[in-house]
Amino acid sequence: MSGTLVLNASYEPLSTVSPRRAVVLVLQRKADLEHAVPGVHFRAAALDLPVPQVIRLRRFVKVPFRQQAPWSRRGVLVRDRHRCAYCGRRASTVDHLVPRSRGGGDTWLNTVAACADDNRRKANRTPAEAGMRLLVEPFQPTPADALVLALGAGGASAALPEWLAARTGMAGAA
């Protein structure tokens, strides 16, 4: 896992921070440790604290409402779990269903993860024109879904607590 998930006092995902910053928030009593990385500890002369995987702020932080997660190339790869939408192999590129040269944009519903071979084979055509079938349909993740998916991108999604997946609607996504 690349970071520690920070939950609001209401258990909604807010952001990620480094494990070191998470420990500081817990020691300053600004946050409570909700879930730790099993078997890994920060140790000091008078301190032995498990490395936080999920922390929850003690005070509610009001954040502006965001209806949709911002699109990014990395976000598409994480959403599709680095699997090609055409063949299921490891994906390293992002493919536009409606090519940009034909007016297709960088949107969640117009982009999928693709392996380099399939991206080259499809070229400047739509999947129907190229005779290629999508294994999965693209979807637009909510900001909370995008955050939880990003945390699980390194293969650590199975280590996330089950209650967190249930609260964010990501149950069964791991």
Image (cartoon, rainbow, N blue to C red):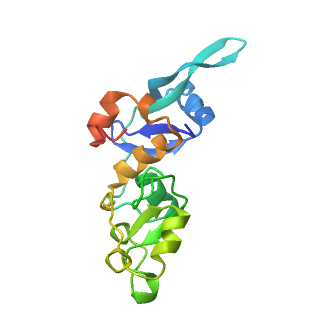
Count of number-bearing discs: 0
What residue is shown at x 26% (from left), y 42% (from top)? 169
In this view of the protein, which residue sits in the foreground, 169 or 91?
A: 91
Do we see residue 131 in this rendering?
yes
Residue 121, image x, y percentages: 49, 73
Quadrant position of the C terminus in the picture: top left
Do we see residue 30 in this rendering?
no
Quadrant position of the N terminus in the picture: top right
In this view of the protein, which residue sits in the foreground, 174 or 62?
A: 174
Looking at this view, name the residue that lies furthest to the top.
46
Residue 66, image x, y percentages: 34, 60
In this view of the protein, which residue sits in the foreground, 73 or 98?
A: 98
What residue is shown at x 36% (from left), y 72% (from top)? 110
Looking at this view, name the residue that lies furthest to the front.
131
Looking at this view, name the residue that lies furthest to the bottom.
102
Looking at this view, name the residue that lies furthest to the right.
45
Residue 129's image quarter?
A: bottom left
What residue is shown at x 42% (from left), y 53% (from top)? 88
What residue is shown at x 44% (from left), y 49% (from top)? 81
Residue 85's image quarter?
A: bottom left
Vertical arrangement, residue 33 with respect to residue 66, above or below: above
Residue 2, image x, y percentages: 57, 40
Residue 69, image x, y percentages: 38, 60
Vertical arrangement, residue 165 with respect to residue 97, above or below: above
User: Position of 74 compared to 96: left or right?
Assistant: right
User: Position of 111 compared to 74: left or right?
Assistant: left
